[in-house]
Image (cartoon, rainbow, N blue to C red):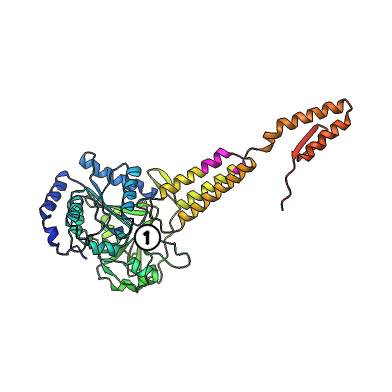
């Protein structure tokens, strides 16, 4: 499963094309960029980082960027084509870039022409993206193919490799078999990864979803492995290997030419070795050598081993391109509060606006590979708001005083005329009829006042 696997016979015919693609990339002078994201690769939070990478590539190509989505990590799913199209649509809408789909969901189907066509796309691409799914499935499909070498060539000769979530797990020396351990109950173990990063001075295990908290009453940090199981596995790593943890909705943009590493998104990244950790937070740009060095201790060079590494606290919002982007949960809470205020003020337009804004937020966040219950909670809020608006519409959203005011004021004026004419029985009849309609008339020294009787609560 490593990058050193011998290419299959079917891929040997493409060696000349690989050389030509590398030469072409070098002649264009593409920057060498590695982007590792913990999650949120198709969420509003990552629009800014994606644009940043595309713009840097476009500055070298004159504007156009040949971009390819590598669909293997989720190739085992029945709706693989829908997922791929949905991901490509995100980049069209959010980043204004066309992304072609490699069409390499599997390599075990015997379609040599289809496989070679997909590999050619990847080799020729300036930008290659892969995201959620199963890391072990992807590794099995890529084993014995030129895919690892084609990805590694971008880091060596020029281009951008943008890997997130499951795909990010495959980059390092070892990989966590997430589904097998967390979903199927296997004892924790390592699987050989692509080991594409040792060549650039990062002998690491990449762990996305590092700050995951969706377990609630149990630890799902460290990509659902949890601290306890990570402590069990850490001693099995080679002496030179350390962990690169990337929080959810967070990424690190590594410019191998400029030798910089910029942390973007909501959280941070963690460099860890033997339970000793160093954090680099979002918004920081550090020399690439800081990552290559791994975790560091105190001034004496030593750091106390931690029995349990705390799960990093990440904010509900982040700022990208000068715009604050909340989480879906924060969006839903804010819009439901706006809806409540609108109903209390009997402002139907504002209430409807809150509902439509939440619907738009759900559509935008719907492209994200959310693992928690945020979408379910937002959907529940939306349904509640719609039901409440319907109930308000049935009873009338407008203030009853605005609707009844002209009629009541006319009746009171007639009552004054009747009293002045000493037609007290007519005056009393007007008052009694208004009371029967739920309108109480109160005579004061300043004149008659009226209020609408509120029905007694049950």
| Location of residue 172 (image quadrant) | bottom left
Instruction: Tell me residue 321's x, y (percent).
Output: 37, 43
| Location of residue 163 (image quadrant) | bottom left
Q: What segment carries the magenta color?
A: 343-354
Instruction: Tell me residue 409's x, y (percent).
Output: 75, 30
* Residue 253 drawn above or below residue 351: below
Labels in figure, total: 1
Which one is in front, 52 or 416? 416
| Location of residue 176 (image quadrant) | bottom left
Crowd around label 1: few <14 · some 14–19 · many ≥20 (10 Å)? many
The residue at the point 77 percent across, 30 percent down is 411
Residue 351 on the magenta segment: yes
Q: In the image, is 269 to the left or to the right of 424?
A: left
Q: Which residue is mark 1?
A: 209
Res. 451 in view: yes
Which one is in front, 362 or 52? 362
Task: Look at the numbered disc 1 and give the secondary structure of its residue.
Answer: loop
Residue 359 on the magenta segment: no
Main SS, magenta residues = helix
């Amino acid at each position: 499963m490593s990058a050193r696997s011998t290419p299959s016979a079917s891929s040997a015919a493409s060696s000349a094309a690989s050389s030509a693609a590398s030469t072409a990339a070098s002649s264009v002078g593409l920057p060498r960029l590695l982007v590792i994201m913990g999650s949120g690769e198709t969420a509003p939070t990552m629009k800014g980082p994606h644009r940043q990478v595309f713009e840097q590539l476009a500055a070298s190509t004159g504007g156009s960027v040949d971009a390819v989505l590598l669909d293997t990590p989720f190739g085992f799913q029945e709706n693989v084509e829908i997922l791929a199209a949905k991901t490509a649509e995100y980049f069209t809408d959010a980043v204004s870039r066309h992304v072609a789909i490699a069409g390499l969901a599997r390599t075990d189907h015997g379609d040599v022409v289809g496989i070679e066509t997909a590999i050619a796309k990847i080799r020729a691409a300036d930008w290659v993206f892969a995201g959620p799914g199963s890391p072990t499935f992807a590794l099995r499909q890529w084993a014995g193919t030129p895919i690892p070498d084609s990805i590694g060539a971008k880091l060596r000769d020029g281009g951008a490799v943008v890997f997130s979530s499951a795909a990010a797990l495959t980059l390092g020396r070892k990989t966590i078999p997430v589904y097998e351990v967390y979903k199927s109950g296997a004892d924790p173990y390592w699987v050989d990864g692509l080991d594409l990063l040792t060549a650039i001075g990062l002998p690491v295990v990449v762990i996305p979803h590092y700050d995951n908290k969706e377990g609630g009453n149990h630890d799902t940090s460290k990509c659902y492995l949890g601290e306890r199981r990570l402590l069990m596995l850490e001693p099995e790593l080679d002496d030179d290997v350390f962990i690169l943890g990337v929080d959810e909705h967070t990424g690190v943009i590594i410019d191998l030419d400029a030798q910089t590493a910029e942390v973007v998104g909501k959280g941070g990244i963690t460099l860890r070795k033997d339970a000793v950790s160093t954090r680099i937070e979002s918004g920081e740009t550090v020399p690439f050598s800081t990552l290559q060095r791994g975790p560091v201790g105190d001034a004496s060079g030593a750091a106390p081993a931690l029995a349990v590494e705390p799960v990093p606290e990440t904010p509900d919002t982040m700022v990208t391109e000068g715009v604050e982007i909340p989480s879906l949960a924060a969006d839903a809470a804010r819009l439901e509060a706006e809806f409540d205020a609108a109903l209390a003020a009997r402002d139907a337009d504002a209430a409807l606006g809150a509902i439509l804004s939440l619907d738009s937020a759900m559509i935008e966040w719907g492209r994200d590979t959310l693992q928690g219950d945020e979408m379910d909670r937002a959907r529940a809020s939306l349904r509640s708001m719609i039901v409440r608006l319907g109930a308000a519409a049935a009873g009338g959203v407008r203030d009853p005083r605005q609707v009844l005011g002209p009629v009541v004021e006319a009746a009171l004026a007639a009552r004054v005329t009747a009293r002045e004419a000493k037609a007290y029985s007519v005056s009393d009849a007007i008052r009694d009829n208004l009371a029967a309609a739920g309108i109480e008339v109160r005579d004061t020294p300043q004149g008659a006042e009226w209020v609408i009787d509120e029905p007694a609560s049950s």
